Image (cartoon, grey):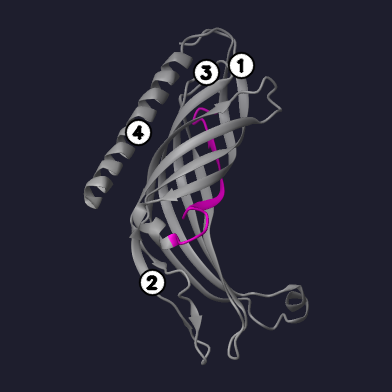
Amino acid sequence: MCKMFIIIWHEMKIKFLIVLLFTSVSLMKVYGQKYDSSKFSFINFYFNTQVAIPHKEFREAIQNDLGNLGFGLATGVVLSPLLENKPSPVLLGIDFSYFKYGQDKQSATVTSPPLKTTYNVFTWNGVARLRPRFQRGSITPFADGLLGLKLYNTKTKIDKDVIDFIFNDSQPEVINNVKSTGLNYGLGVGFYTNPKQQTNPGFTLRVLYLWGEDVNYVVRNSVKVTPGGDVTFETARANTSMVLIQLGITATALKTLVTSAD
């Protein structure tokens, strides 16, 4: 029964993405019709907050009080390969995102200081964006394709207070850092608003599905320091696919094409 539910859930996600992509491409066709004196953007910058919904395997391992979700930031910039010379439906650029899904603290013992372990995920991607050639109306839809790397990072630090930072510089802050990387690729759709004045930022919403390889991660609450000063921890392996929901601000560089579009 559980396996059947998982299969159905994966099929629903794929169908959902197909519908979103089809809708986005349809909107682009409508918004990309010929217009005189049309404006087109050749640079698009965005800065988003994001919620990460990991694959079921990894969600079970997160064990936080926020629905086993991750929260963080994302940013990127895409630009036309034709720059401001001619409108292009394709923009190319880079995308970076980060989210934190947990933090554990351990009190000081006779043999070790107080510790703080944070669990983070970073992604670095190249991105290709498809959108209408010309800006029309108050909303511009787009579809994104991403390819890059995903890094799972578990860092254990001495949980210093302000006095420790000021007077105890001889004590190392980071005592353990575990990293695991894997291939990352995905598809997404969204839109951004077009302010009446170019100097004002617009708002953007993007939904991504990122496929990822299985990676090793540090199990939460497993980091320990032995009496001899060695750091020990447990690891497990899980699928790193996830859904990202991003909301933020965007800025564009526009140019006006006075003659009619071809």
Secondary element under disc 1, as helix, strand or loop, is strand
Mark earlier in primary sequence (4, 3)? 4
Tag 2: residue type? Thr
Secondary element under disc 4, as helix, strand or loop, is helix
Confirm whether residue 194 shows in the render.
yes
- In contact (CB < 8 Å): disc 2 and disc 4: no
Q: In the drawing, what numbered circle is on residue 2?
A: none
x, y percentage for residue 4? 22, 47
The residue indicated by pointer 2 is: 235
**Image-quadrant location for residue 38:** top right
Check the picture and name the quadrant holding the C terminus.
Answer: top left
Tag 3: residue type? Phe
Mark earlier in primary sequence (1, 3)? 3
Depth check, mark 2 against mark 3: the one in front is 2
Tag 1: residue type? Thr
The residue indicated by pointer 1 is: 256
Q: Residues within 10 Å of mark 2 (few under 14, many from 20)?
A: few
Q: Was residue 138 drawn as part of the magenta stretch in this picture?
A: no
Report the residue at 51% width, 30% height from top.
Answer: 80
Q: Residues within 10 Å of mark 1 (few under 14, many from 20)?
A: some
Would you place residue 220 above or below residue 248 in this image? below
Q: In the drawing, what numbered circle is on residue 16?
A: 4
Depth check, mark 4 against mark 3: the one in front is 4
- In contact (CB < 8 Å): disc 2 and disc 3: no
